Image (cartoon, grey):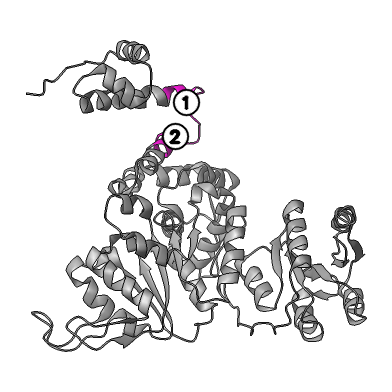
Amino acid sequence: MTGNILIADDDASIRTVLNQALARAGYRPQATSNTATLWSWISQGKGDLVITDVVMPDGNAFDLLPKIKKMRPDLPVIVMSAQNTFLTAVTATECGAYEYLPKPFDLGELMAIVNRAMREPKNSAPAAAGTDLDGLPLIGRAPAMQEIYRVLARLTQSDLTVLISGESGTGKELVSRALHDYGMRRSGPFVAINMAAIPRELIESELFGHEKGAFTGALSRNTGRFEQAQGGTLFLDEIGDMPMEAQTRLLRVLQEGEYTTVGGRSPIKTDVRIIAATNKSLPNQITQGLFREDLYYRLNVVPLRLPPLRERTEDIPDLVRHFLAKGTSGTGRVKNLDPAALDVLIRYNWPGNIRELENLVKRLDALYGHDVISDDIVESEIFKNADNNDASIDRTNLDLGEALEHYLNDYIASFGKELPPAGLHQRILEIVEPPLISAALTATRGNQFKAAELLGINRNTLRKKITTYDLQVVKISKN
């Protein structure tokens, strides 16, 4: 690979690393610590690609990007920033950046982006129109969240259908709102409907509307959510709970771009962006015959998985500060949690995810007058509500792996601040194996040879485990 690459970063160590890596790859790097020199080089026609930090001593790359796109629209610009928020990613995309990378960045990933940008044909299309970015719709600096920011920033510039998956409380509707509010349809309506909250027999009417007299009680024409969302975004929450009949009608809308009201005859053209969300495994639903496979592929154009809070515990301090600040609006008094209390939150399992954390912080803010809340208070509030937290998870809707994960997370969380003693793997096997073997024996009517074959283990191994666990084997006759 050859080409002149301009680097702008006020961190000397980053300039050195990038200079060395780019030179080894065959490029000709040229580095500066300020935006003035960078703009001078670009104005002179230098550079086949730019790598720049956002904030530098004499300026901001986001102020420079529109000028670059106007003067040299074919010059790709890779933006890096330690201010790694969703809005930074969106701003980079809105300003016409080729790619956005949060700091600290992965050098291999950056080099792959550079190589891709240098191989691609130059794009002289004008940059997208800007957006008024006020407020902070998403919070999180964890790597998983940074990748979501980057994907969302790209999706705001498209009209593709998105399928968001994630456990309850991970922020699926928040993400769908961000896609709408910062997307191409921001001037249109955002309409949400939760499939699990509506009686199954009314879902078609709610979605597509109905005509007067279409069914008993239909005293007048009713507009559906598709009509209400015309020109905007329709968010279909808990799509896994949609009845088969409604799934068939939705598939037609996605295929043909039109629908009919319940009791209606004339097709109605629709212009909405569909964003769907689920806390279920739709492939598992398909296997069980509960969800249409063709509809799944129509919805799953862009899959987006939101990580549970236990996979991004480094974001908990930022989330807590955000929720505490929200709770003090109008009072001017901001409470804090001491480090030990934050440690309790970080080590907790969070079966209810961000929603559970927000409710806990609201409770702490309302019930305790302390300016600094201690770990004892936090512990008492978490674990005295443990039963309620556990009941908030509907395990009947989870596949076997998801259900086991929840139960194991709850088991570990039950030890509080202390982790369970070593040897957890063996103890879990000793808990899980006996009912598994019993189930296999029941399924084979007590036939040990068939049970061993079903489990995929040697028959002698099965006999030893039956003895070890003192299992009762009852052979059931076919009669």
- For discs 1 and 2, the disc positioned in front in the rendered view: 1
* Disc 2 crowd, CA 10 A, few/some/many (<14, 14-19, 20+): some
Q: Considering only vertical position in the picture, is 255 above or below 393?
A: below
Question: Image point 51% across, 72% down: which residue?
Answer: 178
Q: Quadrant of residue 29?
A: bottom right
Question: Image point 32% across, 74% down: which residue?
Answer: 252
Q: Which residues are magenta?
A: 408-427
**Residue corresponding to mark 1:** 424
Comparing 190 with 107, the one in front is 107
* Residue 189 appears left or right of 114: left
The x, y position of residue 17, in whole percent, is 86, 53
Q: Quadrant of residue 142?
A: bottom right
* CA gap, disc 1 and disc 2: 9 Å
State the quadrant of the C terminus. Answer: top left
Secondary structure of residue under mark 1: helix
Q: Is residue 183 visible?
A: yes
Q: Considering only vertical position in the picture, is 4 above or below 188?
A: above
**Residue corresponding to mark 2:** 412
The x, y position of residue 432, in whole percent, is 35, 27
State the quadrant of the N terminus. Answer: bottom right
Question: Counting residues from the N terminus, which is met first, the one under dot 1 or under dot 2?
Answer: 2
Question: Image point 20% across, 86% down: which residue?
Answer: 264
Comparing 108 with 188, the one in front is 108
Question: Image point 50% across, 67% down: which residue?
Answer: 326
The x, y position of residue 279, in whole percent, is 38, 56
Residue kind at label 1, given as amino acid type:
Leu
Q: Is residue 281 visible?
A: no
Q: Considering only vertical position in the picture, is 57 above or below 452?
A: below
Asked whether the beta carbons under mark 1 and mark 2 sit within 8 Å of each other, the answer is yes
* Disc 1 crowd, CA 10 A, few/some/many (<14, 14-19, 20+): few
Secondary structure of residue under mark 2: helix
